[in-house]
């Protein structure tokens, strides 16, 4: 998977991708993360990427020309999708992450300031994706969330044991509680069933706990799970 990220702050993307599992996925060539800075495509000597809005109002608007030229400089694979990170998009979820993980290339457009000149949308026609109903200072964190969530779905990124298949959401339920050593901490004991080595009992216990906490914390997911089983 190639991620091409259009951003005015490439170091934000590069620094996050230099750690932990995402770094390992890059080294294993499961993913490649490239950045393109629209500032490098400005035509004036001040390298201006934003300007005041026509019609007045607060803030600055990202200019179309540097953004569109930066976008058009990205080499396109056949199986590619362009995504704008924006609070106006559809909200990201595990189904969309699965769908996106099937592409060979994701081109991610990060906004800043008050927003994009509308002609960027009209020319590029990206799919718009939001992380939720809140506003950030820029689209870099949402882009990184998307890179992270998609990367961990790709073959080889996670080990077999940590595999994404039984994550919360992948099976439609929240995860069961996890415990590690010691067997007792501040008077709180690890449930006996996890210590007796009976895997049928353990699986039953875990499913029961998954159902219990999904019902309590996410009645919407619980309802859907009950309807589909
Ligand atoms: C993008 C917020 C996606 C939530 C500012 C620029 C944003 C965002 N989801 N805020 N992009």
Image (spheres, helix red, strand yellow):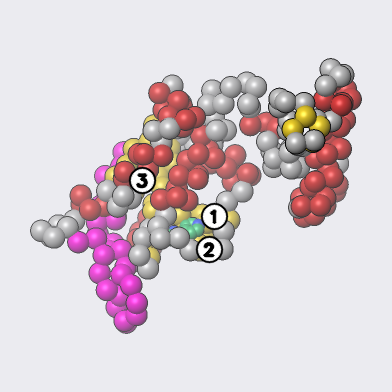
* Picture quarter with the C terminus: top right
Q: Residue 125 in magenta?
A: no
Q: In this view, does 67 lie above or below 52?
A: above
Q: Mark 2 points at which residue?
A: 134
Tell me which segment is drawn in magenta: 48-77
Q: Is residue 21 left or right of residue 217?
A: left
The residue carrying mark 1 has its beta carbon less than 8 Å from ligand 1: yes
* Dot label at residue 131: 1
Q: In this view, does 38 lie to the left or right of 213?
A: left
Residue at the limit of the structure toward the top, as seen here: 197
Quadrant location of residue 45? bottom left
- Label 2, label 1: how many angstroms apart (C-alpha)? 8 Å
The residue carrying mark 2 has its beta carbon less than 8 Å from ligand 1: yes
* Dot label at residue 12: 3
Measured as percent of width and height from the top left, residue 144 is found at 45, 44
Q: Which residue is drawn at 56% across and 63% down?
A: 133
Q: Which of 116 and 198 is in front in this view?
A: 198
Mark 1 crowdedness (10 Å alpha carbons): few <14, some 14-19, many ≥20: many
Image marks 2 and 1: residues in contact by CB distance under 8 Å: yes
Quadrant location of residue 61? bottom left
Q: Which of 31 and 20 is in front in this view?
A: 20
- Label 2, label 3: how many angstroms apart (C-alpha)? 20 Å
Q: Residue 59 in magenta?
A: yes
Measured as percent of width and height from the top left, residue 215 is found at 82, 50
* Picture quarter with the N terminus: top left
Q: Residue at x 55, y 33 (%)?
A: 152
- Label 1, label 3: how many angstroms apart (C-alpha)? 18 Å
Numbered disc 1: secondary structure: loop
Numbered disc 2: secondary structure: loop
Res. 109 in view: yes
Q: Residue at x 17, y 57 (%)?
A: 47
Numbered disc 3: secondary structure: helix
């Amino acid at each position: 998977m190639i991620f091409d990220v259009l951003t005015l702050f490439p170091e934000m993307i590069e620094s996050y991708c230099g750690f932990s599992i995402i770094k390992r996925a890059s080294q294993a060539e499961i993913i490649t993360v490239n950045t393109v800075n629209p500032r490098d495509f400005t035509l004036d000597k001040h390298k201006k990427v934003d300007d005041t809005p026509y019609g007045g109002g607060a803030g600055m608007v990202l200019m179309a020309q540097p953004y569109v030229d930066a976008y058009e400089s990205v080499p396109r694979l056949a199986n590619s999708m362009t995504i704008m990170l924006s609070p106006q998009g559809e909200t990201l979820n595990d189904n969309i992450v699965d769908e996106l993980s099937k592409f060979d290339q994701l081109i991610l457009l990060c906004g800043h300031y008050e927003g994009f000149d509308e002609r960027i949308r009209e020319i590029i026609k990206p799919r718009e994706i939001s992380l939720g109903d809140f506003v950030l200072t820029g689209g870099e964190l949402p882009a990184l969330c998307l890179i992270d969530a998609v990367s961990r779905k790709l073959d080889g990124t996670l080990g077999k044991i940590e595999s994404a298949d039984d994550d919360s959401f992948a099976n439609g339920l929240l995860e069961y509680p996890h415990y590690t050593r010691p067997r007792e901490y501040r008077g709180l004991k690890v449930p006996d069933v996890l210590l007796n080595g009976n895997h049928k009992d353990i699986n039953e216990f875990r499913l029961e706990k998954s159902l219990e906490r999904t019902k309590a914390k996410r009645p919407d997911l619980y309802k859907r799970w009950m309807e589909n089983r």
